[in-house]
Image (cartoon, helix red, strand yellow):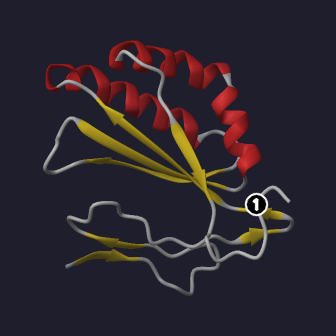
Amino acid sequence: MVKRVLSASDPQYSTLRVESCVIIVAEYFSRKGDKMTVKVVVRRIVSEHRVGDLEPLLRQLETRAMHHQGYISGETLRRLDKPEEYLVISTWESAEDWNRWAKSQERNEVQGKIDTLLGWKTEYGIFHSAFSKRHPDS
């Protein structure tokens, strides 16, 4: 069942979201000058009794990221069959933009609270289009 489709004619990107998918990523990767957009995927698992503590922190991170240079979009997903699992997918103009955000004090203040809540350091992956002809940082 298609939930939402943004116009493919949009010069920046188009997104297809499919309800109840395991991982919902069917987005474009475009080039802006010599930069290529990247997706950052973060998976977090929290005990059920700490969900109420995690969600406000995730909202804080998203709100702060929105104002950071290079941020394009973001989405926080909660797994249907395992509600303690969260997946955050954000799109950035470049890997450099993400790395600046990842190292910023503004992000790390909130991220430190999340890591303490989870009991381990959050891990993430940076992805680019599998069909691009070059690496996003080349």
Q: Position of residue 115 (x, y in %)?
A: 43, 18
Residue found at x 76% / y 76%: 133
Where the N terminus falls, by quadrant? Answer: bottom left
Residue that carries the numbered disc 1 in the rendered image: 136
Q: Residue at x 36, y 63 (%)?
A: 24
User: In the image, is residue 92 above or below residue 130?
Assistant: above
What x and y, as percent, mark residue 50?
21, 20
Quadrant where the C terminus is found in the figure: bottom right
Q: Is residue 33 shown above or below 67?
A: below
* Residue found 34% across the figure and 15% down from its top: 117
14 lies left or right of 59: right
Give amino acid for label 1: Pro
Q: Which image quarter: residue 84?
A: top left
Q: Give SS at disc 1.
A: loop
Which residue is more in the foreground, 91 or 124?
124
Q: Is residue 102 above or below residue 93?
A: above
Residue for point 15% across, 26% down: 48
